[in-house]
Amino acid sequence: MEEQTNITTTRAGIRYGLIFALISIINMLVVNMTNMEKPLGFIVWVIGITMIVMAMLYFLSNNDGLMRYGQGVSTGMAASGVSSVLSSFFFFVYVRFIDTGYIKKQLEMSRVELEKSPDLSDDQVNAALEMSSKFMTPELLFLFGLIGSLIFGLIISLIVAAILKKENKEF
């Protein structure tokens, strides 16, 4: 009797979503604890794309080399969803309870960058920072991070699933 592997799109997505969430959390901690001014965002996005590709390849390899487009998108979104929820929640906890001065530091960094612009007056800089401070709450940062990551995951999943799909030609 053949051993049947039972990998669902959700299982494949969760597996790689957890890995990506862990990498994202470690990256956030390293960036914040070393006071890096330029975060490694580009590297994290490349890793995110890689995790979505790996999740789909894992599903393919455990499903007789077959994956419909919808299954690919489901796998990518499962990975994206798990990673988005966990890393956004961790970021919320970090900003709310661990580094309560995080938002203040970000606003000060923004002030320094805005003041470098010769076209902006002090009043314009203050108005921009006041507006920014209304949107920089831990809750809104959680929400924006979650939504942004899910949209990114959807776009990447749609593209990668179109490339990797392999359907059974038999009817």
Image (spheres, rainbow, N blue to C red):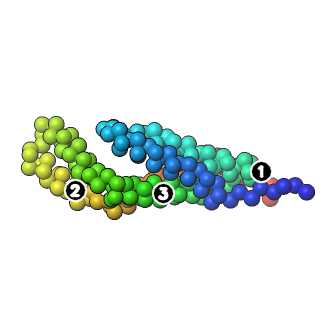
Q: Badge 2, how many Cα within 10 Å: few under 14, some, many 20+?
A: some
- Secondary structure beneath label 2: helix
Between disc 1 and disc 2, the foreground one is 2
Q: Specify the amino acid type for callout 3.
A: Leu
Q: Quadrant of the C terminus?
A: bottom right
Q: CA distance from mark 3 to mark 2?
A: 24 Å
- In the rendered structure, find residue 86 and report the number of the disc placed on it: 3
Please identify the quarter of the rendering in which residue 32 is found. top left
At horizontal 22% and vertical 56% (from top left) the residue drawn is 133
Q: Position of residue 48 (x, y in %)?
A: 51, 46
Q: Judge whether residue 61 can be spotted in this image.
A: yes
- Secondary structure beneath label 1: loop
Give the residue pinned by disc 2.
133
Q: Specify the amino acid type for callout 2.
A: Ser
Q: CA distance from mark 1 to mark 2?
A: 52 Å
Please identify the quarter of the rendering in which residue 136 is found. bottom left
Q: CA distance from mark 1 to mark 3?
A: 31 Å
Q: Position of residue 86 (x, y in %)?
A: 48, 57
Please identify the quarter of the rendering in which residue 121 is found. top left
Give the camera-side residue of 37 and 41.
37
